[in-house]
């Protein structure tokens, strides 16, 4: 028995670091189901990969490389079972925006810098996950992410307009004064968008994207679009990716890549979180964010060593994985097998695909991110957070191509708002409501608990941010009420006290005692009480009274000065 238990314990420890040891053992029914889901996702990721590689300024084949080994490594070491890892629109945009000042898109230097960006971002994710620091990435709240995502979606869509409108390779200024647009490209682009929209609307499980690519390639070949000078994908190299070692990195380039690498890490984690929470909720499991950080980071490293760009979890492809009926990680293995087969034998079939079709694939995906109504809904909930979201949106667009300043600006604004709220905690003088609860007596026009009593509640921690505000509130009440004999702090909301909070509590106690005013403290929670006790601030004294519950406090105050006409045992706070 002991040997069996030891073996089980050892396996659990290994599975902690190697999640693939916990994969379900497949049977025929499971494999058939997983094969169907995996093939569906593969047929979607192949054309998307080519389109997102163009968005990132990378050789088009690297977009398919990003769906091979990165997806395999990520699924082996991630805790979430059904995430589709590969190229995504946001990370591709970030690559293009980050490298624009440093190199020429598609050049040898560009590819090398993109690989360094991928390796740095992957290493950051692995270190954060191994150190259990996943909580750090929660600093970006929903309004900031929403504003950045909407701004990035606008930029991505605008970047695809030249190809969609038949001006591939030309800027808007050149398009106004150059030759007329390519009307065949316009037909391919707009027709592709219509087909993708219809597929998503009416047949979401059907691989519309791959069907579109096949159909457009056939039509392009039939009308000799490439021979007429039309912009097509062209020749892509066949075969699996080899080991890629980037060129040396100067200190200046390293400094220029660190901030974008961190931003890619952040955005990638948030993309993963949106999919992983859904996946784990449906599976009835808790999300292990740190293990997913490790898996996603190792996937990025595999992508970089394959000569590709940063990968992430795609929410749309992960949703298709779930919708297609995938039950486990085996579906990803089938998807990887299809991608590998395509690299080996199917690349010539993509030669005639018009680039306008790739632009349509990207634009359709990003248009789904544009939700102006989200700003209106946020405005109804919180005008300050709506302003932060809109400011992030504007800053993301205004600072393009250095769009990471949008996230950083939004993050700083959100942190400033967070600190402002903690520096200005809600402190109310309480009175007894007819329903038996203690409420804000000035807001609800309630009578005071007793004539010479100042009873207050602070809805915050007693720390460096809030302590001074509490002290000021009590000192103001003492100064404005000459006959004050008692101060009662209802401390139930205070769940933590730091050193500054303890010092200020001591100052409050000494100031009140010097004026002969009694201090009553009700409902201190154990962590807060322990800090004050260790600081010697709860030592018994003639002017200090502590109570375990608010009912005890009100009973004592009533007996001392007629605090309330409601029986103490009816108090509900």
Image (spheres, helix red, strand yellow):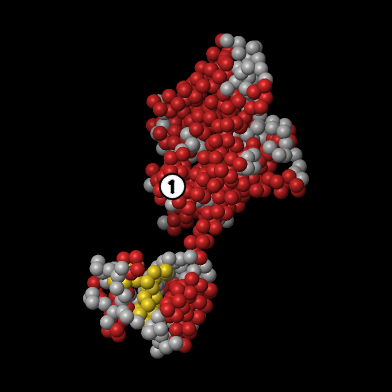
Task: Say what secondary structure mark 1 lies in.
Answer: helix
Give residue 63's position: percent from left, percent from top.
60, 31
Total residue callouts? 1
Whether residue 544 is situated above or below residue 348 in the rendered picture? below
Task: Mark yes or no: residue 238 visible.
Answer: yes
Whether residue 484 is situated above or below residue 236 in the rendered picture? below
Task: Answer few, some or many: residues within 10 Å of disc 1's Cα (few below 14, many 20 plus, some between 14 and 19).
Answer: some
Give residue 480's position: percent from left, percent from top.
42, 79
The residue under label 1 is: 378
* Residue at the (61%, 45%) spot, across then down: 404
Q: Quadrant of residue 160?
A: top right
* Residue at the (31%, 68%) spot, across then down: 445
* Residue at the (69%, 32%) spot, across then down: 105
Q: Quadrant of the C terminus?
A: bottom left
* Residue at the (75%, 47%) spot, across then down: 252
Task: Mark yes or no: residue 86 visible.
Answer: no
Give the camera-side residue of 244 and 564.
564
Whether residue 353 is situated above or below residue 430 in the rendered picture? above
Give residue 268's position: percent from left, percent from top.
55, 43
Q: Quadrant of residue 92?
A: top right
Image position of 168 (left or right of 321)? right
Whether residue 423 is situated above or below residue 549 in the rendered picture? above
Image position of 173 (left or right of 517)? right
């Amino acid at each position: 028995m002991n040997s069996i238990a030891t073996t089980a314990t050892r396996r659990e420890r290994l599975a902690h670091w190697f999640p693939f040891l916990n994969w379900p053992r497949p049977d025929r029914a499971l494999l058939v189901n997983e094969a169907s889901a995996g093939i569906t996702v593969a047929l979607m990721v192949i054309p998307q990969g080519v389109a997102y590689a163009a968005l990132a300024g990378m050789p088009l084949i690297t977009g398919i490389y990003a769906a091979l080994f990165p997806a395999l490594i990520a699924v082996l070491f991630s805790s979430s079972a059904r995430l589709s890892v590969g190229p995504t629109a946001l990370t591709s945009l970030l690559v293009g925006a980050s490298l624009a000042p440093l190199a020429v898109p598609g050049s040898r230097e560009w590819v090398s810098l993109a690989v360094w960006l991928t390796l740095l971002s992957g290493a950051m994710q692995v270190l954060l996950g191994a150190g259990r620091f996943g909580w750090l990435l929660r600093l970006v709240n929903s309004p900031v992410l929403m504003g950045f995502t909407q701004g990035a979606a606008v930029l991505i869509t605008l970047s695809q307009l030249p190809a969609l409108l038949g001006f591939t390779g030309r800027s808007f200024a050149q398009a106004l004064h150059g030759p007329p647009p390519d009307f065949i490209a316009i037909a391919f682009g707009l027709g592709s968008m219509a087909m993708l929209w219809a597929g998503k609307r009416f047949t979401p499980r059907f691989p519309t994207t791959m069907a579109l690519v096949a159909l457009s390639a056939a039509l392009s070949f039939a009308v000799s679009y490439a021979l007429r000078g039309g912009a097509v994908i062209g020749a892509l190299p066949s075969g699996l990716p080899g080991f890629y070692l980037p060129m040396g990195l100067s200190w200046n380039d390293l400094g220029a890549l660190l901030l974008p690498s961190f931003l890619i890490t952040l955005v990638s984690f948030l993309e993963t979180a949106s999919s992983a929470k859904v996946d784990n909720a449906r599976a009835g499991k808790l999300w292990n964010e740190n293990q997913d950080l490790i898996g996603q980071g190792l996937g990025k490293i595999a992508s970089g060593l394959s000569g590709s760009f940063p990968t992430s979890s795609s929410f749309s492809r992960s949703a298709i994985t779930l919708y297609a009926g995938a039950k486990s990680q085996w579906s990803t293995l089938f998807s990887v097998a299809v991608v590998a087969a395509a690299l080996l034998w199917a690349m010539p079939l993509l030669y005639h695909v018009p680039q306008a079709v790739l632009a349509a694939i990207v634009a359709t995906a990003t248009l789904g991110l544009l939700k102006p109504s989200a700003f209106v809904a946020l405005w109804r909930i919180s005008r300050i957070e709506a302003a932060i979201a809109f400011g992030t949106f504007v800053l993301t667009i205004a600072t393009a191509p250095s769009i990471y300043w949008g996230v950083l600006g939004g993050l700083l604004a959100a942190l400033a708002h967070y600190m402002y709220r903690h520096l200005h905690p809600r402190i109310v003088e309480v009175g007894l409501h007819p329903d038996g609860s203690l409420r804000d007596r000035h807001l609800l026009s309630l009578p005071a608990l007793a004539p010479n009593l100042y009873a207050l509640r602070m809805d915050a921690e007693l720390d460096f941010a809030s302590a001074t505000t509490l002290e000021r509130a009590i000192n103001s009440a003492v100064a404005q009420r000459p006959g004050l004999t008692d101060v009662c702090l209802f401390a139930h909301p205070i769940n933590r006290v730091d050193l500054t909070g303890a010092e200020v509590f001591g100052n409050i106690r000494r100031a009140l005692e010097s004026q002969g005013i009694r201090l009553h403290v009700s409902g201190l929670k154990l962590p807060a009480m322990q800090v004050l006790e260790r600081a010697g601030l709860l030592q018994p004294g003639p002017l200090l009274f502590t109570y375990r519950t608010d009912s005890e406090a009100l009973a004592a105050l009533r007996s001392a000065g007629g605090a309330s006409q409601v029986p103490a045992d009816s108090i509900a706070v």
